[in-house]
Image (cartoon, coloured by chain):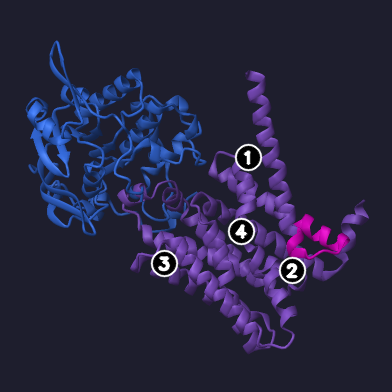
Chain colours: A purple, B blue
Amino acid sequence: MLEFLTAPLQYAFMVRGMAAAILVGVVSAVLGCFIILRGMAFLGDALSHAVLPGVAVGYLISGGAREPVFWWAMLTALLSALGIGIVTRTSKIKEDTAIGIIFAGMFALGIALISTVRNYTADLTHFLFGDVLAVGTGDLIRTAIFGAVILLGIFLFYKEFLVLSFDPVLSATLRLPTRVLEFMLIGLVAMAIVVSLQVVGVALMVALLVTPAATASLLSRHLPSMMLISAVIAAFSGITGLYLSYYLNIASGSAIVLTCTLIFVIVWSTRTLGARLAANRSA
Amino acid sequence: MSIARFRKPALRDEERYFPHEPGVPILNVDHLQVKYGEIMAIDQIFFQLNQADRLAVVGPNGAGKSTLFKAIAGLLKPTAGSIRIAGHEPGGHLCISYISQRSLVDWTFPVRVFDVVMMGRTGRLGLMHWPGKRDREIVHHALSVVHLVSLADRQISQLSGGQQQRMFIAQALAQHAELMLMDEPFSGLDKPSQEELFKILDDLRPQKVTVMVALHDLKMASERFDKALLLNHRQLAFGLPADVFREDILEDAYSGKLQIRPTTGGTTAFDDTCCEEEGHPHA
């Protein structure tokens, strides 16, 4: 049994991958609590798809080096967030429509750019679904730094984000800088997406942001403990996913997301079933 | 342990927000008009309130009651006319609280009663300052005023309608609100809960808290309030309830949709006691 657990860890790439999966999982899961409370899941999904052209440009100009990809992705994520805000504020177009337009447009641009490269399918797959086992030491350091920045941001503005999520009207009558806070939260989401890119890729990113948080929301009625539970679920899914990936030879990103989803299904069904049984007993 | 220690102390409220001029009415509304684009929501509103007044705002559904409240709270900009809170524009004040209709609140939100009341402190604390002992004492005191100390650790969905309303009054007290705007606080409450709410409002009178309440029950408005404002986009009457709720004026406001029944004490009118209002989203 012990050997079953330690065998994959003899490989440095497995250890780095696991560290990255835990880091990214915890950061996304904590931030994800605000995303599900504010109903921003669609925005999170859209932003993660919208970084694709940035990834492509970084990839094309650097010939495969990691660092430019990271910075270009960050720039694209922030620009997309800004674009969605501007379109919503300056026209009659509703926010989810604006998100849809920008998300699909940017995603198409990303695919167009990547399709100019010869071995297009292989590269596209890499960006769409991530490759946690290719995480290098430099990637890990950047992930740790930005993860810490995101967690610090949540910590410092916790009480403002809480008010904003609970009641935007209250936030306005308390004279909080509502617009600035909203954009800061979206900025943190953009950052989380970029650091998570390598682990799950753009297509599955939204799962890290919403699934552990949604599972935790079924188990907790107090935000700090919900964040903690969400983080634990994400870290556990990261580790389990990588073992599954190693032994069953399935793609690592999908293994992590499937573990998250399975935990959600188990919690959701026991909760619903439990509530049904309790109702029957009392009836 | 607090980050605040490393920063300069928070500005005192008087330094950050407009001072209250002595001898000026707490609220002065002068020829107020609010339009949503081309649609006229309210027009030609003019009235004054003194400290500790209790005003009933009455009018048919969609008459502009919530719009009036939001304009006074500084959430909507008047298109004409002016609002003065103790001599200054509403936007600079932290002494106004707006208590939304209960149906607009997300009661599944993972917070406890104590947390929601503590939210009232957020504006006073300032960014990156954490609630301290004094804030917790203020929250505790606010909870004791509304008799909710024993329920402080409950998740908010576990409260009854009356308790939910009292929780928001405690939040306003923690904010040190001097002008409370309550949107339909009595809707959906049973008689004992309504009486308990009135008792708390009576207790607040010596503290010079001015209260504006939107409501549908004309009998309650005429018996339990110092002043009344009858509204149907325009201001139809303002003054003592006895002068406002005259049959001819009410007929004008509700254009025949009102049931007026002769009772032993004179005439009693019943509004259509529906709770839906206006259909403007809660944002």
Neighbour class for label 4 at 10 Å: few (<14), some, many (≥20)? many
Q: Amino acid at mark 4?
A: Ser
Disc 3 vs disc 2: which is toward the camera?
3
Q: CA distance from mark 1 to mark 3?
A: 33 Å
Q: Earlier in the sequence, mark 1 or mark 2?
A: 2
B98 part of magenta stretch: no
| Quarter of the figure with residue A20 | bottom right
- Does label 3 or label 2 sit earlier along the sequence? 3
What SS does tag 4 mark? Answer: helix
Which residue lies under the disc numbered 2?
A132
Q: Is residue A231 visible?
A: yes
Count the labels in the image. Answer: 4
Find numbered disc 1 in the image and state the secondary structure of the residue it sits on. helix
Q: Is residue B263 left or right of residue A85?
A: left
Q: Disc 1 marks which residue?
A: A219
Structural distance between the alpha carbons of marks 3 and 2:
32 Å
Q: Quadrant of the C terminus of chain A?
A: top right
Q: What amino acid is labelled 1 in the image?
A: Leu
Of the residues shown, which amino acid type is indicated by label 3?
Gly
| Residue A27 visible in the displayed image | no
Q: Position of residue B63 (x, y in %)?
A: 21, 42
Looking at the rendered structure, whether the residues under marks 4 and 1 are on a common chain is answered as: yes
